[in-house]
Image: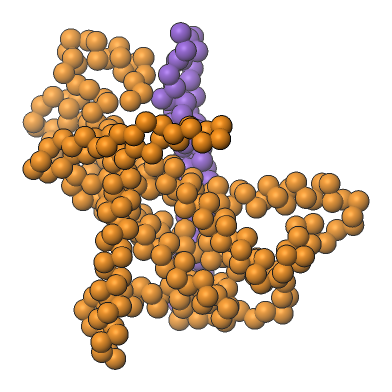
Chain colours: A purple, B orange
Amino acid sequence: MEALGLGYLAAGLGAALTVIGAGLGIGKLAAAAMEASGRQPEAAGAIRTSMIIAAALIEGATFFALVICIILATNKPTP
Amino acid sequence: MIVTPLQEHIMSDSLHADFSFSELFEHTHDSRDLDLPFIGHVHLPHFDPVHIGGMTIDFSVTKHVVFLWVAALLLFVTVVAAARKNRASKVPSGLGNLVEVVVVFIRDEIVVPNMGPGGIRYLPYLLTTFFFILLMNLLGMIPYGATPTGNVSVTAGLAVIAFIMIQYSAIRAQGFGHYLAHLTGGVHWALWPIMLPIEILGLFTKPFALCIRLFANMTGGHLVIVSLLGLIFLFKTYFIVPVPILFVLGINMLELLVAFLQAYIFTMLTSLFMGLGMQAGHVEAGEHDHSS
């Protein structure tokens, strides 16, 4: 396999694994937030705010991996 | 524009000869030309790179620089007009009311819960951060607009300023001696060679995360929009057009939300880090909970 082809493969696989991780993490977060809102509807506003903040932080980590995948995918080979 | 060998192979194929990846992706990248609605292509002034110290700095004007200035000008005009309107009458109305709602939200939900009453001193900086980032994000949503925050240099500059403000607020609240003492983490002096590099590295990772988060969110959204529109060119038929347009409509709605959210997150995290630095000196500082 050519090295460049492996790079494209790595970029695609990396992006997929990253999204799996982000989806799992934010899914757990949303589930906990829903449950807490169900238990105490008065706190729903504060819970929603905290949920959005935590989701943005998790997505921040996701985007680190995404940037590396983009660098891999747009790599210009040296002759 | 970086064209990968795969794209070159596609472009050399006679079936795809008139399809150019680079023209699509140029909507997200910085460029030396400006594309205006009726005037067409405008070549921006180009200055030769300047050598200062060991570095070569290019001061020429690019598309993102122009939109940085547009955002700054819009911000200045809007906020000054709103302040003037609020100064004239006791009851805010119109533009003054709109700006005041956001200002009060930032003051009561972000600054005071995170930094305490002493955080009002830093309110102008945080308000500027929020409105500036919001305006820059929204400028990319209008036709012929570009997103300055989609440029890693712009977000790096914002992160550098945030870093300076975080250290400044911590030093001002605790004094320089206490600030250095907190870098050691209160362990035995034999462990300092381990603690100090980790703590100093920790000082830099937080603004770095701010920079990358904002940059990747803005660039990623626009890359998705551009790629979906590129589907139309790839299929080379008019019958496919409603499908990508519907997808792009959905992604544009998401992008509006992300623009507001990322401005809010940047401001909130900056005030959180500043608050953590300020509170480290005062253990008994109480936090006022304004959640309603």
Across and down, in percent, residue B57 comes to 45, 35
| Numbered-mark total | 0
Q: Quadrant of the N terminus of chain B?
A: top left
Q: At 47% from the left edge and 49% from the top edge, which residue is drawn?
A: B157
* Residue under the point 34% across and 16% down: B6
* Residue A62: % across, % down: 50, 43
Q: Is residue B253 visible?
A: yes
In the image shown, does A75 or B258 lie closer to the viewer? A75
- Rendered view: B14 above or below B21: above
Q: Is residue B2 left or right of residue B153?
A: left
User: Observer-nearest residue: A36 or B200?
Assistant: B200
Using residue B124 as the reference point, say whether residue B259 is left or right of it: left
**Which of the 4 image quadrants contains residue B241?**
top left
Q: Position of residue B259 (x, y in %)?
A: 34, 55
Relative side of B19 to B270, left or right: left
- Is residue A30 visible to the viewer in this orientation of the structure? no
Q: Residue furthest bottom?
A: B90
Please state, as top left, top right, bottom left or bottom right, where the C terminus of chain B lies in the image: bottom left
- Identified at 20% across, 25% down, the residue is B234
Residue drawn 29% across and 72% down? B80
Above or below residue A1? Residue B273 is: below
Would residue B141 appear left or right of A76 to someone viewing this image? Answer: left
Percent of width and height locating residue B118: 58, 78
